Amino acid sequence: MQVGALAGELSLPNAASADSPVQRLGRSIRFAVSSLRQSLGFCARGIRILCRDLVEVALLLRTFTQGKPLKSADVQVGAPDAP
């Protein structure tokens, strides 16, 4: 659905219809708001992933500093193997 809206925003106006400056400004503002929302959504997903990773590292460090043994899955690089 977003692709269709974006395509509509990017489509060139019909040569027979003359857009007023207000219409062009409105279209530009809608496009800018849409782009901003998509950018903020992308950043929010990245921040959520970063926070999740930081919490996981903190938990591993706490386990390590308490002298408890780490599991082999805790020290693997990459995705753990499925059982």
Image: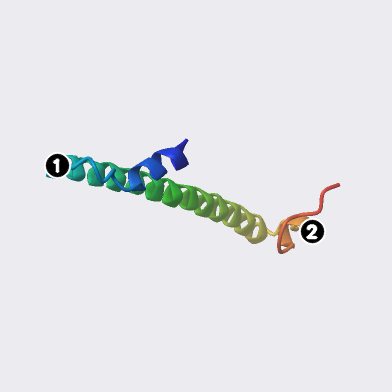
Q: In this view, does 74 lie to the left or right of 53?
A: right
Residue type, label 2: Ser
* Residue identified by numbered label 2: 72
Q: In this view, does 18 lie to the left or right of 1?
A: left
Coordinates of residue 33 in the picture (x, y in percent): 29, 44
Q: Vertically, is 78 above or below 26? A: below
Foreground of the two, 73 or 79: 79
**Of all residues shown, which one is farthest toward the right?**
83
Query: Which residue does the image show at 41% across and 44% down from the upper left?
Result: 7
Coordinates of residue 66 in the picture (x, y in percent): 65, 57
* Residue identified by numbered label 1: 20
Q: How many marks?
A: 2
In the rendered structure, find residue 47 and report the number of the disc placed on it: none
Foreground of the two, 42 or 50: 42
Give the CA separation, mark 2 to mark 1.
66 Å
Query: Which residue does the image show at 48% across and 48% down from the upper left?
Result: 45
Instruction: State whether residue 43 appears in this view.
Output: yes
Q: In this view, does 2 lie to the left or right of 64?
A: left
Foreground of the two, 15 or 64: 15
Residue type, label 1: Ser
Dot 1: few (<14), some (14–19), or many (≥20) neighbours within 10 Å? few
Coordinates of residue 72 in the picture (x, y in percent): 79, 59
First of labels 2, 1 by sequence position? 1
**Of all residues shown, which one is farthest toward the left?**
21
Coordinates of residue 35 in the picture (x, y in percent): 35, 48
Instruction: State whether residue 71 appears in this view.
Output: no
